[in-house]
Amino acid sequence: MYVRDAKNREEVWLLDNIEAMGLDGTAFRSRDYVVVVDETSGDKAGFGRVRIHKPEDAPEICELTSIGVVESWRGQGVGAHVIERLIDKASDDGFERVYALVGVPEYLAQFGFEHIDTDELPSDLRHRLDTKRETIEPDAMPMVLDIGSFEVPPHLRERFKEAGPHDVAGESDEDADEMAEEFGIDPDEATYKYDTGR
């Protein structure tokens, strides 16, 4: 597994996943994203974005947004490595702090992000927060991270080393048998999925 900058040809994949996950696609530009790729299969496992805001009368602001992990890759440290790469990009661009407007603050807290009051946000992000709450994430909360305090928990690093897709859509034979019984079908006797008794 590795994390790299997104390529222009991945725009459709990114947009499809942003929509499917209900993430923020505002002012989409594929070049702002990073993507996690499995080097063996070439499958993409996750993504995230650095969005730079350029107020007319204030310093530039860095926001981490649209962080998503494909369902079959969740729980394996993929999101942590997306965030780490985004932090590296922000640091390379000269930012000392980054913001995020998220509905799951506990997730970012494990990396050193802290909740801040809305009135502590730069004005551009206050407007973004209002819009985000009205459109896609009613529980969005403002968070901030001083880049120097960023840390990936060791257990997430370990999971990432062994990451692989797991089946989320398939059902086990046991699940299928239980469903058959719910419809009055004896799975040991039925010769068809829906035995009509003929």
Image: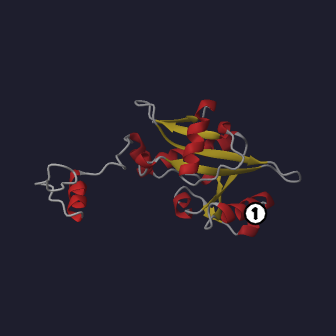
Asked if residue 25 lies left or right of residue 40, the reply is: right
Residue visible at 24% across and 54% down? Answer: 176
Q: Which residue is mark 1?
A: 126
Q: Secondary structure at mark 1?
A: helix
Q: Nearer the viewer, residue 137 or 57?
A: 137
Asked whether, in this view, residue 42 is left or right of residue 140, the answer is left
Q: How is the image coloured?
A: secondary structure
Q: Is residue 121 above or below residue 76?
A: below
192 lies above or below 121: above
Q: Residues within 10 Å of mark 1 (few under 14, many from 20)?
A: some
Q: How many numbered circles does the render carry?
A: 1
Q: Position of residue 24 (x, y in %)?
A: 64, 53
**128 or 153, nearer to the observer:** 128
Q: Residue at x 14, y 49 (%)?
A: 191
Residue drawn at point x = 25 percent, y = 60 percent: 179
Q: Amino acid at mark 1?
A: Arg
User: Where is residue 34 shown, x and y percent of the image?
Assistant: 59, 39
The single residue placed furthest to the right in the displayed view is 57
Across and down, in percent, residue 126 comes to: 75, 63
Which residue is more in the foreground, 126 or 72?
72
Which quadrant is the N terminus positioned in?
A: top left
Occupied quadrant, residue 146: bottom right
Image location of residue 39, percent across then percent down: 44, 30
Q: Residue at x 56, y 34 (%)?
A: 4
